[in-house]
Image (tube, grey):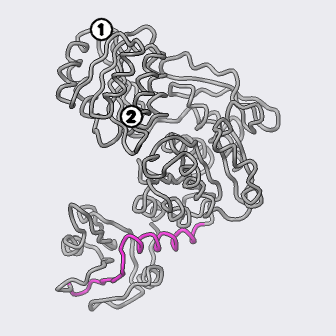
Amino acid sequence: MERITLRELKEATKGSLLGSCLKEEILIGGVQSDNRKIREGDVFFAFPGERSDGHDYVGPALEAGAAGCVISREPAQLMPGKFYLLVPDTFLALGDFARYYRTKFAIPTVGVTGSVGKTTTKEMIAAVLSRKYRTLKTEGNFNNNIGLPLTILRLAEQDEAAVLEMGMNHFGEISYLTRIARPDIAVITNIGDAHIGNLGSKEGILKAKCEIFEGVPEGGTAVLNADDPYLNRLRDDLSLQKKVSLIRVGEAGDADYRATEIDDSQAEHMSFAICFPDGNKTRVFVPAPGRHMIYPALTAAAIGTCLGLSPEQISEGIRTYAPAGMRMKIEELSGGRILLNDTYNANPQSMEAGLQILSGQKERRRIAVIGDMGELGSRSRELHRDVGAAAARLGVDVLITVGKDSEEAARKAQEDGVPEVHHCADKEEAKAVLKEYLLQPDTAFLVKASRFMQFEELAAFIKDTVT
């Protein structure tokens, strides 16, 4: 973060100063919400929470060198020489501060949302733009009301572009984030079933994702999936078209950036040709498997073109893409075994994409270890059964399901002819079942579930047992 004054922080948050330190020209060098990460001159934001309250750590943060703090509850004692900025809500104060700080940077900014593939798309765009610009990107999944403001507050004078991921569970959350970020380019990857339990229907999900346009200025750009039937409805939205230029990417014949000559036959990568709007064609290599990877690559190509990158720079950027976190990492193990580690999160669309990648491991026995998917509401039973049907359709040899809801996937898979199906009540039971299969060489294991299932434990068990 570039240094700012206490006066700017106070005005941005509309807070009231307490304590003996009232010099508003004091410089602040950074923002922290974890007292263990405080550096000299930082400001500490105290966030209340269910498990712990940041106000309990104000003292340690100030003792560690913080210049002051932003609080929503006045402390019993005030430390001399430190400022205390009292606000009604520290979460909203962080957003207000980030909104103000964003105005200091006139750089192209991309906002990314969607049901599936947000992080992959964000990483791909950043990989491409980095071929020409110093690019700030959201780290990990810092895409909520705390993570996005903290990402914006990392902007520095040297940055030339930013790619910001925006997540949501309910209506109004994207609206809040986009008004802070003010993206020049808005991306919606797709409309799927994630969070349908909170939003009611895919129509509701579309409405929630379209909140991203509220923060885009007049003359901005929207990049949309041309193969998504819900996003295709936006072609007829005249009010949206008056505000932004629509760019559509996909396999559809009328897509502005179109994928052709797709080769997804390889287990660890794929390639295809990008047809640009000017009629030129460039073949690109994507260092990750699966046909679905055309969408983040095409989106990055469209944005790269808008920001002045050449086809060669775009191609090289796509080639340098690397998956983030626990998202579809292909890990080679001993004895011809392979682990498809996609344990970060799951919804019906990403689950099927993972099964498709597993199905490409034709030289190995294909074993899917899947767990419950959350926030599906009344459609949970149906959507878990769809996963079981996909496992059968895609030729999975063994399906191991874990958790209450995923039992429906096991039932459907058994009905549809998956050769071996095991349902486990918990991860310990799954480990016992897995031991038998881990002894077999030339096997491919897909491990995937929603975040709350913490399936990285099973991925680690597979690696530790095999190696």
> Is 272 located above or below residue 118 in the figure?
above
Q: Secondary structure at mark 1?
A: loop
For residue 247, side relative to residue 62 (left or right): right
> Is 329 located above or below residue 202 in the figure?
above
Residue 264 screen position, x and y as percent: 57, 20
Q: Looking at the figure, which quarter contains the N terminus? A: bottom left
The answer to which quarter of the image holds residue 335 is top left
Name the residue: 34% across, 9% down. Answer: 442
Residue 312 screen position, x and y as percent: 69, 35
Q: Secondary structure at mark 2?
A: helix
What residue does disc 1 label?
441
Nearest the camera: 153 or 375?
A: 375
Which of the two discs, 2 and 1, labels the residue nearer the N terminus? 2
Name the residue: 54% across, 49% down. Answer: 205
Mark 2 crowd level (few <14, some 14–19, many ≥20, 10 Å Cα):
some
The answer to which quarter of the image holds residue 286 is top right
Mark 1 crowd level (few <14, some 14–19, many ≥20, 10 Å Cα):
some
| Residue range highlighted in magenta | 79-105
For residue 341, side relative to residue 291 (left or right): left
Identity, as a three-letter code, of the amino acid under mark 1: Pro
Nearest the camera: 70 or 115?
A: 115
